[in-house]
Image: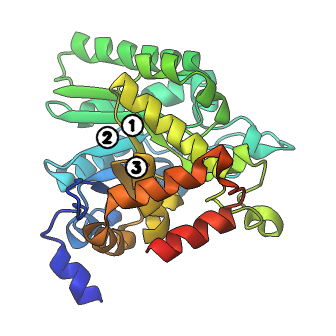
Amino acid sequence: RQERYRLLREFPPTTRDGVRMALMMNAGLVYDMPHLDESGADGVGLFRTELQFMVSATFPRPGAQQVLYSRVLDAAGDRPVTFRSLDIGGDKVLPYIRATAEENPALGWRAVRLGLDRPALLRTQIRALLRAAGGRELRLMFPMVSEVDEFRRARALVDRELAHLDRYGHTPPAKLHLGVMIEVPSLLFCLEELYREVDFASVGSNDLFQFMLAVDRGNAAVSTRYDVLGPSFLRALRLIVTKAVAAGKPVALCGELGSQPLTAMILAALGYRTISMTPSAVGPVKAMFRELDLGALRAELEAALDPDSGVTSGAEIRALVTAFA
Ligand code: PEP
Ligand code: MG
């Protein structure tokens, strides 16, 4: 099987009915980058920058941050890399940042909230990214955005850093794309405004599922209680992509849902064309897409998601898609 996936590296993830998918990989350290060639992924759809901070005993210095981002871009060559700004706080505690005890860390002072409250920290990271990407393309997204204004404020920090770069004669990125992760359900109710502002979005289905279903992703007693294929969650994912297409903005998905052929197949049927996954999933997911009649699956799934279909559970949808597969 490994040999089969290796041979597939040179072939595109195009479905039997001619839809070209883009399969990206998730990464977090420079050591992950060789997986890009090994897996045959089209680029890095999620670079979790907090990993460098989590493996370090002290706050990584601006120069060290810049070196890492630069090496990641070098390793990717002409393939796109989407960096995510620091997603720390909550359960991802850094010993060198004063932590306050929180009763609900997942709902607490984390990610972009912390970045906007401690702008020096976020600005340092943004500056390192902008410098590392001088003369080349930079894609940056912000995690745990709950309202459009948070994106605007984060973008204002980027603008300040761009002005700073200019003042000191540094080369700016050749192209800059700023986006958000969609992982807090409130964004589902302001998608039009959001898509007007951002250059792109990426669905963090792990957190979106946790917050939509009110189910702690780290608590084994409840984390497997609900099926990710339940109709309410699939309709939410469909709404996100449908409105993105209407607004003409690219949207990807980078949660664990993309890493299994069966669920990746459903994402494509809902309208997703770019999926980011763990590197070892790229081969199996590509093999699946090359065999898939996407139009036929979409028709079956749309019928199941019709409120009059009688389908109310993820188990029914899973059975239907498994039978199709
Ligand atoms: C997600 O929430 O789906 C995601 C990709 O981010 P993380 O798993 O790092 O929270
Ligand atoms: Mg997340």
Q: Disc 2 or disc 3, which is closer to the eye?
A: 3
C-beta proximity under 8 Å, tags 1 and 2: yes
Residue named by callout 1: 62
Within 10 Å of disc 2 (Cα), the crowding (few <14, some 14-19, many 20+) is: many
296 sits to left or right of 137: right
37 sits to left or right of 110: left
Q: Position of residue 232 (x, y in %)?
A: 67, 47
C-beta proximity under 8 Å, tags 3 and 1: no
Mark 1: secondary structure:
helix
Residue named by callout 2: 66
Q: Position of residue 273 (x, y in %)?
A: 33, 48
254 sits to left or right of 133: right
C-beta proximity under 8 Å, tags 2 and 3: no
Mark 2: secondary structure:
helix
Residue 200 visible at all: no
Q: Could you tell which of marks 2 and 3 lies nearer the N-terminus?
A: 3
Residue in the image at 66% along x and 29% along y: 186
Residue named by callout 3: 46
Q: Position of residue 129 (x, y in %)?
A: 33, 35
Q: Position of residue 306 (x, y in %)?
A: 60, 46
Going by the numbered disc 3, the residue's amino acid type is: Leu
